[in-house]
Image (spheres, coloured by chain):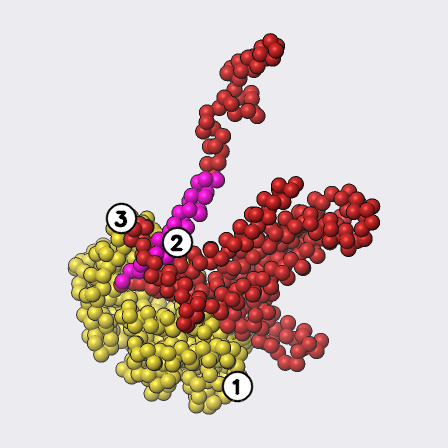
Chain colours: A yellow, B red
Amino acid sequence: MGEGHRDLSRRTFLRRAGAAAVAVPSLSAILAACSKPGSTSGGASAIASIEIARPDNPVTLPLNGDPIAAGTALEAGPLQLYNWDSYLYKKIIAAFEDEFNVQVDLTTFNNQEEGIQKVVAGQVQPDVFFVTTDYISRLVQKDLIQPLQHDMLPNMEATVWKTFWDPGPWYDTGWRYTVPYTIYTVGVEFRRDRIEDSVAFEQGYELLWDPAYKGEVVYYDSYRDALGMAMVKNGATDPNTGDQATIDQAKQDILTLLNDQDGVLKINGAFALLPEGQFTVAQSWSGDAVGAQFYLPKGTSPDVLGYWYPDDHKGLISNDTITIPSTAKNPALAHAFLNFLLDEKWGYINFRDWNGYQPPFTTIDPGTLVSDGVIPPGLSKAVVAEDMFVEGLIQGQLTPEVDKRWLDAWGEIKAGG
Amino acid sequence: MASQTLDSGSKRKRRKQAPEAEGSSGALYPKWYWPSFTSPGAVWLVFLFLLPFYTILAVAFGTVDPAFQTPLPVFQPWWWSFQTFSTTLQKFYGDPAIFQQPAIRTFLYVFTASMICLVVGYAVAYYAARYAGKYRILILILLVSPFWISYLMRIYAWQSLLQPDGYINRFLEAIGVIGQPVNWLAGKPITVILGLVYGYIPFMILPLFGSLDRINQSMLEAGRDLGAGPSQTFRRVTLPLSKPAILAGLVIVSLPMFGDYYTNNLLGSTKTSMFGNLIDDAVSESGRGPEAGSLVLILMVIVIVPMLYYLRETKRAAEEA
């Protein structure tokens, strides 16, 4: 068990803080209102040139200038980090401060939309920004993140899976702008003290819809994950589909889960509420399932936690990234921090002792995580291996039209159907 | 007459010499002097109401960033688009009317919770004001004391109590009210309504207490002298005299209830979604900023009705007094 426990998941999604961003636009937003919003540069003209990346259609992003020189001296700081709440172990920050003799300030956002909005508006000007893959190309198109100096990130090749640096990830071939942070699957978490493994593994996704667990199921309050998993359950192989019938069927299934089965949408269900005993089955990111062991009541064995992900690996899988914004005041120090997080020791500690989200390190042997006691036996399917990305279903950026279809369906779900 | 003229003249003279000595008259102060006292309130109003309200208009009638789908407020009215507002409105009565049920639900929940607040709050305030004697201060402190603890923490405590294996179920099972545990947190209207009551009832009790405490005892004695029994005295004297406080309490508790979203977030589910949840969801999701602004405007129009009724009633009460 880690020393510090998260109060909220790194994806304490979709709840609170967006309101402030909507209600109080930044000064730059007000000044920008001198011309009609949406008609200026970066608006409609920019979107037209954004290429939608997919695993089978990898994108090499255009360079916004050159990376900083390899020999750039480290700035004096303070280094500004902008990350999800509780997604980074404070001991990692302290260790970096000690090693580089600088101050590190961490600012957090509650969901990615909030983080993006504040960076776009200039309300926050971080040196290091943690981003999901679906925003990368748009950030590049708007010149909001800067190219990385590979010579200052030697841990990429030393520690990280080769696919992330040769040829580089599908959303950023050549890893011009990003380094990976964590990897995770989206599966089903369950209480092994209430459900036999054999029953859970046989039912898979259907466990969430099993009437036997009426009122004991919690599903993510996150439209891409929620609708995406329902689609995969129904046999869809494209988790980015714009097919209205597929979206409608997923919507209907979730409405059934919520209205007939008394399921609830929560963002902290998998990592906090299930281990606390409130729920029996949860839609779950693998990292939340692993992190759930830190939320078990005192004296409860982590063996009560179980996780299912399809054995053929044809389930949702993804990774998060770290970037350096164009406005970073300490770009060299930011590179040093990225390299520090990719260090086999610190990345591993962040995973093992804090957030439960596995980094894509060659130094971590997925086959020994359970035997080494890092991951409880019931969560063996939460281990992420490199080859799982080959078969896995990866959610990427949607076109505005398709996104609207997803959001309309989600809006109906959230309104109670 | 001559004396009056002289006096008046001498007063004017004194004022000219020592205007600060005249506190009650503004005759010799610049025109802006007294109105300037409203400036803090005016600044407050402009920065904390008018500007935010105009921003909501700009968001509701604005657009979204084509790349990030973040709201782009449009501050020039000549560029406003009412398309999203119209679409949002249609979701209340069109096909599918996906916002209709949450809206109806909100009215039912707010009405029920407000009435419970009134009935329970009136009884408590009445007792505290008339019968608590030396314990009235203690009762008031106890009423306010929950506010020393964060609302979030209190609701988390309720979450724990209301769990299937929580103390509420255990207690109800022990006394035979229920045969098996009830999942109170799986979208039960009663849980959300009682959550609203729990969160807002002190705001009902305090104005009621203030009003009931100030009712002149002689008024009640006069009623009794005229032959009224206790219940008639209450109906014909106490209740009418406390009507302004009842209205104030209802307004104070019901208006924020209309926009409340966190009670349902913490104690309910999508089956108990309220108007505030619609706004919260629209704000939180990309591309729905203008819809969120539109919902805020629609809610404002709805809540302005009871507010206007309250203003009319208080004005009438003031005129009758």
Which residues are the magenta region? Answer: B41-66
Residue A289 horizontal/vertical position (percent): 44, 76
* Residue highlighted by disc 2: B56
* Residue highlighted by disc 1: A212
Q: CB atoms at circles 2 and 3 under 8 Å apart?
A: no
- Using the image, name the chain to which the residue with label 1 belongs: A
* Residue highlighted by disc 3: A34
Q: Main secondary structure of the magenta part?
A: helix
Q: CB atoms at circles 1 and 2 under 8 Å apart?
A: no
Q: Quadrant of residue A410?
A: bottom left
Q: Quadrant of residue B85?
A: bottom left
Q: Residue at x 49, y 77 (%)?
A: A259
Residue A56 painted magenta: no
* SS for dot 3: loop
Looking at the rendered structure, the kind of residue marked 2 is Ile
| Rendered view: A277 above or below A176 | below
